[in-house]
Amino acid sequence: MKKQSSLKRRAFFVDDRAVKRLRRSLGVKSDSEAVRLAIDFADDMKRFWNFMDRTRGTLEPESFSEPQG
């Protein structure tokens, strides 16, 4: 998990079954930890896809080779 900055209490509604599925898939014990990890994951994925969009088409064909091994 990323370095935690300040935590702030929020009030919102979530689907209880979705949180239970999330807890199981992430292997965490608390709802709050599952939600924090999911938010971090969503942010990481958005940053990744933004990077992919920005760098699309910048590699020349066959500019890298397959690892030997």
Image: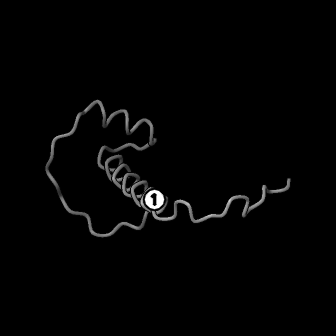
| Residue 16 left/right relative to 28 | left
**Considering the image in quadrants, where does the N terminus appear?**
bottom left
- Counting from the top left corner in percent of width and height, residue 27 is at 46, 41
- Counting from the top left corner in percent of width and height, residue 46 is at 39, 56
| Residue 35 left/right relative to 24 | left
In the rendered image, which quarter is residue 8 located in? bottom left
In the rendered image, which quarter is residue 15 located in? top left
Figure check: 10 above or below 15: below
Instruction: Please name the residue shown 18% across and 58% down the image.
Output: 9
Q: From the viewer's side, name the closer residue of 56 and 16.
A: 56
Instruction: Please name the residue shown 51% across and 64% down the image.
Output: 55
Q: How many marks?
A: 1
- Specify the amino acid type for callout 1: Asp
Residue denoted by label 1: 53
Q: Residues within 10 Å of mark 1 (few under 14, many from 20)?
A: few
Disc 1 on helix, strand or loop? helix
Instruction: Please name the residue shown 73% across and 59% down the image.
Output: 62
Most distant residue in the left direction: 11
Figure check: 37 above or below 4: above
Q: From the viewer's side, name the closer residue of 14 and 50.
A: 50
| Residue 46 left/right relative to 62 | left
Instruction: Please name the residue shown 30% across and 34% down the image.
Output: 18
| Residue 36 left/right relative to 61 | left
